[in-house]
Image (cartoon, coloured by chain):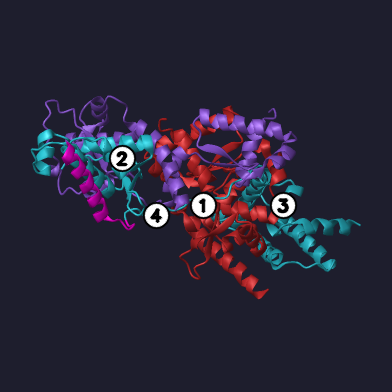
Chain colours: A purple, B red, C cyan
Amino acid sequence: MSFNPGSVIESILFAAGDSVSRKELADILDMSEEEITKEIERLSDFYRENDRGLKVICLEDEYQLCTAEQNYRYVQALAEPRRKQSLSPAALETLSIVAYHQPVTRGSIEYIRGVNSDGPVSRLLERGLIEEGGRLEAPGRPILYVTTQEFLRSFGLSSLSDLPEIETGIGAQISVDTIVMDEEHLEEPFAEEELSRETNVSEELETNQVNE
Amino acid sequence: MSFNPGSVIESILFAAGDSVSRKELADILDMSEEEITKEIERLSDFYRENDRGLKVICLEDEYQLCTAEQNYRYVQALAEPRRKQSLSPAALETLSIVAYHQPVTRGSIEYIRGVNSDGPVSRLLERGLIEEGGRLEAPGRPILYVTTQEFLRSFGLSSLSDLPEIETGIGAQISVDTIVMDEEHLEEPFAEEELSRETNVSEELETNQVNE
Amino acid sequence: MEENQLSVKLEVFEGPLELLLHLLKKNKVSIYDIPIVKITAQYMEYLDAYQKFDMEVSSEFLLLAAELLFIKSKMLLPRHEEEEEDDPRRDLVSRLEEYQKIKKAAEFLKDHEFAGHYNFFKKPDLIEKKAPDYSEQAFDLDRLLSAFAVILDKTQRKEPPPKTSFSGIVGHEKVSVTSRANYIKKRLAKERRVTFEALFEEIKTRPALVATFLALLEMMKLEIVFVDTSGDEIIITKLRDGEITNEF
C-alpha cells in the first residue's frame, strides 16, 4: 500500500488522543511543516465532505482529533447510559400500528407505513414493547405482533381501551400524536432539519458553558 | 445534514476510547442491533476502501476503534516504545487451556498440563490476558479463570469462536473441564466413571503441591 | 557425552506429559497404542538420568512414573475378555489426547501472539456530564411574568379593544400553542439565542402573544429551551429538539 499522509496523520492523532505539534508530525512523516498544514486541511475537508464523526481542531500549531459537534448529543448519551432512550418516529409509527391493529403481521405494518419496517419492528421487540402473538393462518404463516404489558406500563396506560379513538375513515392513517406519551417520552425525533439546528445549539451551549 | 448512523458511531467509538457494546449503540442510536451490525460493516468498508488510518475491531459483541496496522511504524514513533515480549511455552499452554476450557480452575489447568501452573497463571493475570470469572460451586470454591477482551485484542481475534477447532483424532475427548462443567458431555460413554477417577487424580496433584 | 545430550533434552520438557509424548514420537507409536512396558522403561531411564546429574525432578514427573508403573502392573495381570473395554491405559490416553490438543492450540496462539501488536488504541475522552441541570437552576418566574406583562401592556396600547380573557382569545383566534412553539424553535434555530423582548417583538396580536408565552413555558417545562433570568436580559436558548404534541 502506498504511503498515504492523511491516513498516517489520522492514525497518529487518534493514538495520541491529545494534540500533536505540526513539527512533530513533520518529523514523523518526514515532510515539511507546510506540507503537513496542507495535509491537515485535506483531512479536515475529507471529514466535512464525507460527514464523518471526527474533526481536526487546530490549537496554535498543534492538531487534535475530536468528535464532530453534530453528533454531540449521542456522545453525551454515552456518559449517561441509563437514560431512557426515545423512540424514533419510525418506531413510534410502527408501535401505533401494532397498538391499533393488533394482532398484525409485518406485512400489514409495511403496507400501512409504505416502507420496509424490519428495523423498527426489531427495535420494538428488543425494547419489549411488542411481542409475537401467534401466527396468521395464511400462506407462510406470518408472525402476528401484539403490544406487551411493558407497552402499557411505559405509556402509562392501564388497558388498550385507554388508547384514544381515532376517527379516520381509513383505519390506516394513524398519526404518531394519537399516542400521547408521558413527558419523558417527548424526546426529540431525529427529523432532518432538526438535526442541523442541533449543531448550532450545541455550539451555543458549549460557548455558554465556557462563558459561565 | 441528515442523520448519519456511521458518523454517529464513529464519534461514539472515538470518544469512548474503549469497546462499546452493540446493545449500547443500538440504545443510543435507537436502531436495532442488526442495523448496528450493518452500519459497523459499512464503516469498516469505508475505512478500508478509503485507506483510512482507523479500523473498527469487533470483540465478541463489542466494537472498538484502533489505528490501522499499515501505519504502525509512524504511530510507534510517537507512542512509547512497545516491547514485543513473547509468552513462554508454559504461558501459551496455560492460555490455550483457559481459552478452550473457560471457565476453568487452576486445578484443571494443572491436571491437563500435568505440572504446577502457578507461575504461568500469575503471568497471564499480570498481562491481563486472563481474569477471574467467578468461583466453582465445589469444595473450596476454587477460582474460575476466563480470557479477557485484552486477550482477543492482543491475538487479533474478534471472538472466541475464531479459535480453530483442534482435531485430536479418534476417541472420546475427555477432559476434566468438559466433564465437570458441561452437562452435555456427560453423555459420553465413560463419563461417570471418568469423573470419579479424575477427581482422585486432581486431588492427588493438589496434595502433592501442598507437600512440596 | 551420550548422557549429556540426554540431560540437555530433559530440561526442555514442560512436564511429564510432554516427555511421554516425546517418547511415543521417538518410538513411532500412537497414543492409542502405547507399548506400556517399553515406554515405562524409557521413562524411568530419563528420570534416572535426571538424578544422575543431580537435577531436581519435580514431583509431577514422579507422579506420572507411579502411574505408568501402576498401568504396567495392571496390564501384566491376566484379563477376562469382557473386560477389554476397561483398558488401564484409557485414562492416560485421554490426558495425552487433551494435552496434544492444547499443544496445537498453543501453536495457533503463538502464531497470533502479535496480531494485535500493530494496532494502537486511544484513551477514553472525558465526556462531561450534562453539567448544569437547567431545570434545577434558580429561575425567577416573577421576573419572567413581569417582563411578559410589560410586553402585553405595550401591545395593548397599540391594539384597540375589545379585550377578552386569554383562553377565550386563544380559542377564538385559533392560535395554537404548537404553532407558536414551532415559531420559537425557528427563531432559535436562526438566531441561537434570543432575548425575551426580541422573541415577542414581531408578534402583534394578544392571542399570539399569549399563545407564544404558553408555548415558551411548556418548552421550558419539557426542557426544550432554557430561559436564563439571571442576567440583565432574559435570554432564551435551545437545549434540545423536541415537539409539543399535546394541545391544551
Q: Is residue A180 visible?
A: no
Q: Which residue is mark 2?
A: C198
What residue do we see at 49% from left, 58% from top? B180
Q: Is residue A14 left or right of residue C241?
A: right
Mark 4 against mark 1, which lies toward the viewer? 4
| Residue B122 in sight from this viewpoint | yes
Q: CA distance from mark 4 to mark 2?
A: 25 Å
Q: Amino acid at mark 2?
A: Ala
Estimate the spatial distance between the alpha carbons at disc 3 and disc 1, rounded to whole Å: 31 Å
Q: Nearer the viewer, residue A113 or B141?
A: A113
Residue hosting label 3: B85
- From mark 2 to mark 1, how far is it between C-alphas? 37 Å
* Residue density around tag 4, few if under 14, some if 14–19, many if 20 or more, within 10 Å: few
Measured along the vertical axis of the image, is residue B182 above or below residue A178? Answer: below
Which of pointers 4 and 2 indicates the residue nearer the eye? 2
Chain letter behind tag 4: C
Task: Say which of B100 and B42 sits in front.
Answer: B42
Identify the secondary structure beneath mark 4. Answer: loop
Q: Are marks 4 and 3 on the same chain?
A: no
- Tell me the number on the disc at residue C132: 4
Question: Is there one chain holding both mark 4 and mark 2?
Answer: yes
Circle 1 marks a residue in which chain? C
Chain of the residue that carries numbered disc 2 in the rendered image = C
Name the amino acid type tagged 3. Answer: Gln
Report if residue A88 lies within the magenta region: no
Q: Mark 3 Cα within 10 Å, few/some/many (few <14, many 20+)?
A: few
Residue placed under numbered mark 1 in the picture: C126
Task: Give the spatial CA distance, label 4 vs label 3.
Answer: 47 Å
Tell me the mark number nearer the camera, choosing from 3 and 2: 2
Viewer-proximal residue, C135 or C237?
Answer: C237
